[in-house]
Image (tube, rainbow, N blue to C red):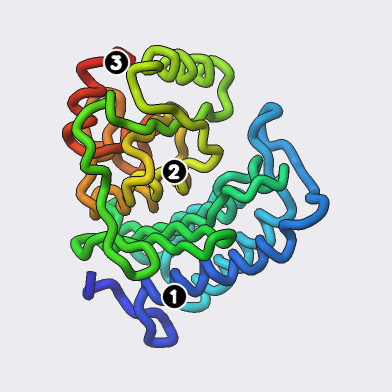
């Protein structure tokens, strides 16, 4: 999307965003070995580590320098109001529980919106060095190679990903969905990182991803990746999701139709 405003340095928004997530990724990987300081935000499932805050600071410092007028919405700190219609949405570590337990499956997620319309989405996996990116109207890419969603056409052929979220009742509900699907699908996976799971759906590693308890920072970057990769992202009602949707069904159009016919949520 060529009309995105340049940063203070004259660089484009995508270039700035890539630098931000990679710098955050360096921080995350430097602290990956060893103990983390863990705090609990709500209940026993929603945690934050000291590294989440370090990575978030690395991202916000660069973005505020390059785009001082843009607003910022981030998972771990208070929102920052700007004078622009643009808003950065940041998840410094999506998959914090995996990270804290030493499981190498997590990512940095960064998106840019213009009046709630997604215009840029980046998911960066610092473990594998995989950078997923999409600009509105320009396609989706993994390390500069174009990607597309699965070409499967039915649930029976599909590998399904899901996550349980932080609410016990919703967790039970999604387990019920997985139980209803099995054994009528290839297999199911609990991913532990919604943003990375959405990126995997965008490139066809997962055929379908379901989540019933999302926040904007979980969804924004991956939603644009999937749509630019030719897929659909809807709520449980089958209508197109937006960045404030709490539930998501992400897949291609054929599997989405099959899923909506087969499962009642």
Mark 2 = which residue?
A: 197
Evaluate whether residue 79 shows in this view.
no
- How far apart marks 2 and 1 lie (CA) works out to 24 Å
User: Which label lies toward us, 2 or 1?
Assistant: 2
Mark positioned earlier in the residue sequence (2 or 1):
1
For the C terminus, the image quarter is top left
Seen from the viewer's position, the closer of residues 98 and 6 is: 98
What secondary structure is marked by label 2? helix
The image quadrant of residue 31 is: bottom right
Mark positioned earlier in the residue sequence (2 or 3):
2
- Residue 248, image x and y in percent? 35, 33
Mark 1 = which residue?
A: 16
Q: Taking 128 as reference, is 37 left or right? A: right
Q: Taking 171 as reference, is 198 left or right? A: left
In the depicted structure, whether residue 217 falls above or below residue 128: above
Pointer 3 local density, CA inside 10 Å: few below 14, some 14–19, many at least 20: few
The residue at 63%/64% (across/down) is 57
In the depicted structure, whether residue 221 falls above or below residue 18: above
- How far apart marks 1 and 3 lie (CA) works out to 41 Å
The residue at 50%/19% (across/down) is 170
What secondary structure is marked by label 1? helix
Mark positioned earlier in the residue sequence (1 or 3):
1
- Residue 98, image x and y in percent? 64, 43
- How far apart marks 2 and 3 lie (CA) works out to 21 Å
- Residue 189, image x and y in percent? 48, 32
Pointer 1 local density, CA inside 10 Å: few below 14, some 14–19, many at least 20: many
The residue at 52%/77% (across/down) is 65
User: Which label lies toward us, 1 or 3?
Assistant: 3
Q: Name the disc covering residue 263, or none.
A: 3
């Amino acid at each position: 999307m060529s009309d995105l405003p340049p940063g203070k340095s004259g660089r484009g928004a995508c270039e700035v965003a890539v630098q931000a997530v990679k710098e955050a990724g360096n921080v995350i990987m430097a602290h990956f070995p060893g103990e983390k300081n863990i705090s609990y935000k709500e209940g026993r499932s929603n945690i934050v580590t000291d590294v989440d805050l370090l990575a978030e600071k690395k991202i916000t410092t660069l973005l505020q320098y390059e785009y001082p007028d843009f607003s910022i919405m981030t998972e771990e700190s208070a929102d920052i109001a700007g004078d622009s219609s643009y808003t950065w949405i940041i998840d410094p570590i999506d998959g914090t529980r995996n990270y804290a337990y030493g499981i190498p499956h997590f990512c940095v997620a960064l998106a840019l919106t213009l009046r709630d319309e997604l215009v840029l989405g980046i998911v960066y996996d610092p473990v594998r060095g995989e950078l997923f990116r999409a600009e509105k109207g320009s396609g989706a890419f993994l390390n500069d190679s174009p990607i597309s969603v699965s070409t499967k056409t039915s649930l029976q052929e599909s590998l399904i990903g899901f996550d349980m979220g932080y609410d016990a009742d919703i967790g039970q509900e999604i387990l019920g969905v997985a139980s209803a699907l099995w054994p009528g699908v290839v297999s199911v996976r609990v991913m532990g990182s919604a943003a990375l799971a959405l990126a995997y759906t965008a490139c066809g590693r997962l055929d379908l991803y379901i989540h019933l308890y999302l926040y904007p920072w979980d969804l924004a970057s991956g939603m644009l990746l999937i749509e630019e990769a030719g897929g659909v992202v809807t709520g449980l009602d089958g209508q197109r999701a937006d960045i404030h949707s709490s539930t998501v069904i992400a897949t291609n159009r054929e599997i989405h139709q099959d899923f909506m016919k087969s499962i009642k949520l």
